[in-house]
Image (cartoon, rainbow, N blue to C red):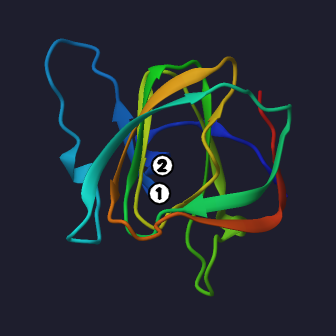
Amino acid sequence: MVITPQPLTREAFAPFGDVIDMPREAGRFYYDDALGNLRGQAAASLSVALKAETPERPLSSALMERHEFSSQTFIPIDVGRWLIVVAPHAARGGPDMAAARAFIADGAAGVTYRANTWHHGLTTLDRPGRFAVFMWKAGIADEEFVPVAPFTVKIP
């Protein structure tokens, strides 16, 4: 399967979560409605991640992940272009790779994956990048990684 990414827009990404635009003017902007937690005992978790390597072109992968109970937000701190690959949850379980989509974001937009949204691992394209990551943790496993049929993403 070959996926051709499109630019990240609110409308195109809406089935999978929310786009978090970086402010272009003074002020504070809230994205509370984008956050989701399906476990009352879960605590907020904020981390910073460095993604040091960039992928071969085209990107080839056979692995997807999800967080069944928590949204997961990625806010670019020092990032060029980055790749987002998402898929809905299939009726029979696992990711529905036939409905997978790919997006290319610039360093001026982050995303929040809704709980139970399948996604590929964080992938920077042009150079290493740093992200702030927000999610909810409750001491129980909320990370699921599954093998999928190999797919390729054509990266411009």
> Does 11 sit above or below residue 6?
below
In the rendering, at what x and y percent does residue 64 appear? 67, 59
> Tag 1: residue type?
Phe
Task: Give the residue at mark 2.
Answer: 13
**Could you tell me the amino acid type at mark 2?**
Phe
Residue sitting at x 82%, y 55%: 151
Residue farthest to the bottom, as pictured: 92
Residue sitting nearer the eye, 123 or 86: 123
Count of numbered circles on the image: 2
Seen at 60% across and 23% down, the residue is 81
Residue depicted at x 69% and y 19%: 126
Q: Quadrant of residue 62?
A: bottom right
Numbered label attached to residue 16? 1
Residue appearing at x 75%, y 43% in the figure: 4
The vertical placement of 49 against 92, above or below, is: above
Mark 1 neighbour class, 10 Å CA radius: few under 14, some 14 to 19, many 20 or more? many
Relative placement, left or right, of 148 versus 130 is right
Q: How far is disc 2 from disc 1 in space, using C-alphas?
A: 6 Å
Residue 149 screen position, x and y as percent: 83, 66
Quadrant showing the N terminus: bottom right
Residue closest to the eye, 58 or 122: 122
Which label was assigned to residue 108? Answer: none
Q: Label 2: state its secondary structure.
A: helix
Q: How crowded is mark 2: few (under 14 residues within 10 Å), some or many (20 or more)?
A: many
Element type at marker 1? loop
Residue 146: image x %, image y %?
69, 68
- Left or right: 63 in relation to 123: right
Mark 1 and mark 2 in contact (Cβ < 8 Å)? Answer: yes
**Left or right: 143 in relation to 154:** left
Q: Looking at this view, name the residue that lies furthest to the left.
A: 27
